[in-house]
Amino acid sequence: MPPRLAFLLLLPLLLPTLRLLPATATAGILALDEPLEWAAPERPDLSLRRSRARAVPIPGAGDFELALVAADSLPRLRNRYLDAAARNPAYGGDRGRIPAIHLRRGTAELADIAARLPEDGRWLLCEGTVCELRAPLFVEAGAGLVIADRILNLEAGRGAMLVIAGRIFLERATVRGRDNGRPAIFREPERFRPFLLVLSGGEGIIRDSRLAHLGFAAAHAYGLTFTADRPEEEPPPTGLVLRSEILGLHYGFYSRAARGIDLLDNLFRDNIRYGIDPHDDSRELLIAGNRVEGTRERHGIILSRRVTDSAVIGNRVSGNAGSGIMLDRRSNRNLVADNIVSGNGADGISVYESDAVWLLRNIFRDNGRTGIRVRNSRNLVIAENRVTGNGGDGIRLYTGPAPKTAAELGPTFVQRLSGLLENNALADNGDADIVVKGGIEWLALEHHGTGGAGLVIAGDGPWRRALVAAGTARGSVLFDSRLVPSPGLIRLPLP
């Protein structure tokens, strides 16, 4: 598997390093005579990561052990999946009637599995390069399933699903949900559709493939999911998705407590709820070079609930119903760089209750709401972004009640915000270019002699006056909630 993100070794650098500089106090503002010093995290080597992703070998089929069992007898096939599948007329509401193909040992291809099954069951049919799965297929820990140069149709009416506790390899493959021979088009969230799920201890390698019409609203059955169902017993699920098309899934990608997954150079289009959604304690992810378009209900890319130490780099995120990118609920220590985020229904990027985030060299343009929205987040660096033509504010920094409970956010949660803004280009936004409101701990602004005096400033009176003063300063400006010089503030402690 690809190695951990190299920049994780440099986590101490994920906070601005500010040294005590000569300064002049004017009108309650600390104007620094030299630029602030800070260092960005090391950017992952995308060429190397792509090369390693391409080099992961696809194993050949060999000896394997297979059984046809009652789906109910496999505890890792959750009842909610089987209950939904059993509502199909084929099973009359009785999940005990659902069979499952259990690959217990070894590595197998679809045609080899089909040849081993009873002929009267028609649970897996292969003809030429097209196969149809008509039952759940569970790959045990230590076993492997290879789907290469094939089309696999998963029949919704028979409860087809791929659940992987071992390894799955998709190479130049198409995996698509079907409903009585037609595409399993999304109609309602609770209606069963087939899905691909990689569990604890599992690995999914997906390259040059196409996934379509998968997933429904049962936990982790969202379409393409990597989830830790046994976090105390097995390693987290991992894998990669390279140069593939992900179309019409309930969630284009979802993870829970996964680790080290690379999503590289894929197309996520017309997915229902979210495009890319790493969740709950997933970490060390690389999301790079993807196009994320047309998500129907919410956001293009969202990192939510303690998704940490990850990188979102060089993606094109456009035309999604919600925000282009969102980080929320303690998604700390993440790098968001070199993305083009345009034409989304809400914000270009929303950062909620997430600390030590770097927003570098992104383009946020023509989004329906704010270009960059930050709430209750500390020690951010927002540098060299182009924020233009958004329907609301260019950059909005504020504090306020979080929509989730303080218990979920942890005992140290406070409504505070701090960060560095350096050399961002703002123009033609619908409201103010910069808005600052609420319980700000400190802000540092770095100007390079252009644009500052022409910014449209809004927000709370003291912050508005401070920002106007900062716009006319000849160098850097650092100020805290008292709007006075504070040497202790400059020597920032780790959070």
Image (tube, grey):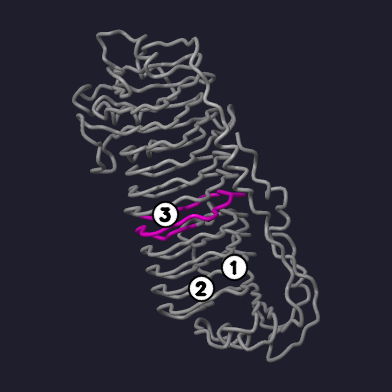
Residue matched to label 3: 300
Answer few, some or many: residues within 10 Å of disc 1's Cα (few below 14, many 20 plus, some between 14 and 19): many
Q: Position of residue 409 (x, y in %)?
A: 55, 54
Front residue of 409/76: it is 76
Residue contact between numbered discs 3 and 1, judged by CB atoms under 8 Å = no
Instruction: Establish if 374 lies above or below 308.
Output: below
172 in relation to 131, above or below: below
Q: Quadrant of residue 440?
A: bottom right
Q: Earlier in the sequence, mark 2 or mark 3?
A: 3
Which of 279 and 295 lies nearest the eye of the viewer?
295
Q: Position of residue 312 (x, y in %)?
A: 54, 53
Q: Are marks 2 and 3 in contact (CB under 8 Å)?
A: no
What label sits on residue 395 in the rendered view?
A: 2
The kind of residue tagged 3 is Gly
Marked residue nearer the N-terminal end (3 or 1): 3
Q: Amino acid at mark 2?
A: Ile
Judged from the image, the secondary structure of the residue bearing numbered disc 2 is strand
Q: What residue is shown with label 1?
A: 382
Residue 241 place in picture, x, y as percent: 48, 39
Q: Is residue 170 left or right of residue 16?
A: left
Check disc 3: other Cα within 10 Å, few if <14, some if 14-19, many if 20+: many
Q: Which residues are magenta?
A: 298-326
Task: Check the picture and name the quadrant holding the C terminus.
Answer: bottom right
**Mark 1 element type:** strand
